[in-house]
Image: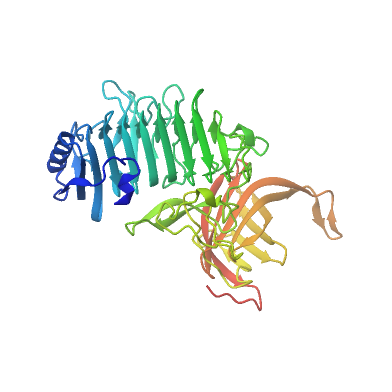
Amino acid sequence: MAVLLLLCCAAASAAEEVVVPPGDVAALREAIFQANAGTERYLVSVTGTFEFGEGQSLPPIFGDVALIRFNNEAVFRPADDAGPDQLIRVERGGRLVLQGLDIEGFSLSSVPPHEGPLIENRGELLLEGLHFADLRGFATTGGICCDFDTAPVIGNHGRLEIKRTTFLDVDIALDDSGVQSAVLANHAGSAALREVLTATEDVFGSLQIANRGGIVRIINSTLAARGAALLTEDGAITELVNTIIPSLPGELEATDTEGSLACTGPVVSLGHNLVADTSCQLDGPEDIQGVPTGTLPLRLENRSGRLVPVIGLAGASPAVDSADPAFCGDLDVLGTPRDKDGNNDGSRLCDRGAVELVQRRLTDGGINGLYFVPGQDGHYVTVLDTPSNVLVIWNTFDRDGNQAWVYGVGELANGRSVVAEAYTNEGGVMTEMGPTGIDRAIPWGTLILELESCTQGRLLFDSHRPEFGSGEFQFQRLASTRQLGCRD
């Protein structure tokens, strides 16, 4: 239980330990009432599914409380889609630890008098190993929106620490003024985020960290945002290290990477960040910006053994084995050990971002070959691995049915992964006498190829051109390059 002492050093041991009956909301509320009446730590063990009815929030935290999952899982969710507007509030002088909980299905409201974040902290709050999912915000019109002043997932005015926590399928989008709501709105005090992942099942969601005052430090996290991932207002300080901010596929023009919104407002870089655009204006050591991040949607096992959608790394991502070890923790957001040799150079280093690379490798040359897309005639992928680089050719059609050959060159990583800047050729024609005219390579976007085995894989594409857009598809091997075998 050493983790419980991170914020609450004054409590040397738990004075009381209570095991709440599975899913018993009334017993849980009573345990917190008892904790508020004491002066020492109150350890409350929870398991099962707790369903909170309308207006049935937890009592405000004035004491020193730790809610810890035991056994398989502990889930907090609304009863019949009618849960409380605010689930948890930590008052000044209060201390709360939440560990190992799943919090899902709640609605966030910015409609008076039902204002307030789902979790509000004015004291000391530690969130560790939490999984937030399927959270929604609603406005007066019934549309999906809210105001980050009144209805973020977490509102902080005190001391906050978030570790190894995921925010998945969280939809809290624009309000009427065009301002996005936030996973975290830091109004004052301090917030430290380590191994935090924001993402949704459709890859990217309406998520951001809004720092309105105080200090926010973000370490080894992945922030996938529809809009600004980081908002920092005047007087606030946001520090960033070992963190990835991917782009939203399909929304950047080829000549306008600075127009995207990974960051709004100043960011203090501590180095080793990877951002798809240049809006953060990073100037720390080993920062990489304005390039493809080599991230892709995966489904990986979390701490409970459940498959969850995450933003993971392709083997060719520049995030692999390139984080600053001074800031690396022992585990990633899913509980995977950090000290792995992801690029096979003999050094065990952690990766940037919240999710460590899941290393997979085919035998040398095994990626070579011709692949097809089942059920979609005319879509073929050709891969040619040479000693210096890898050529990827995608024979496809645009949204208007026009045939296109998209090609890119990149470097092979882990024997199965390629991130390639892609092009199409325009001008020039082929005649009986050979090619005539001037052939020009036109920038197209990015291709990410990831072989899952010797027989199948995925291609993710992100084009600047609206007739192609962004997406992904599975492909299967049609033919292998002669004399080059493949073993998983």
**Residue 121 in the image: above or below residue 105:** above
In the displayed structure image, the side of residue 118 where residue 194 appears, left or right: right
Q: How many marks?
A: 0
Residue plotted at (42% across, 22% down): 176
Position in image of residue 384 (x %, y %):
67, 65
Q: Quadrant of residue 196?
A: top left
In the displayed structure image, the side of residue 47 where residue 317 appears, left or right: right
Position in image of residue 74 (x %, y %):
24, 50
Position in image of residue 18 (x %, y %):
15, 48
Residue 188 vs residue 484, the one in the foreground: 188
Q: Is residue 255 visible?
A: yes
Q: Quadrant of residue 256?
A: top right
In the displayed structure image, the side of residue 47 where residue 454 appears, left or right: right
**Residue 210 in the image: above or below residue 344:** above
Position in image of residue 327 (x %, y %):
51, 48
Q: How is the image coloured?
A: rainbow
Q: Quadrant of residue 59?
A: top left
Residue plotted at (55% across, 46% down): 470
**Residue 424 in the image: above or below residue 208:** below
Residue 432 vs residue 347, the one in the foreground: 347
Q: Is residue 224 visible?
A: no
Residue 315 vs residue 47, the one in the foreground: 47
Residue plotted at (26% across, 42% down): 11
- Residue extending furthest toward the bottom: 483
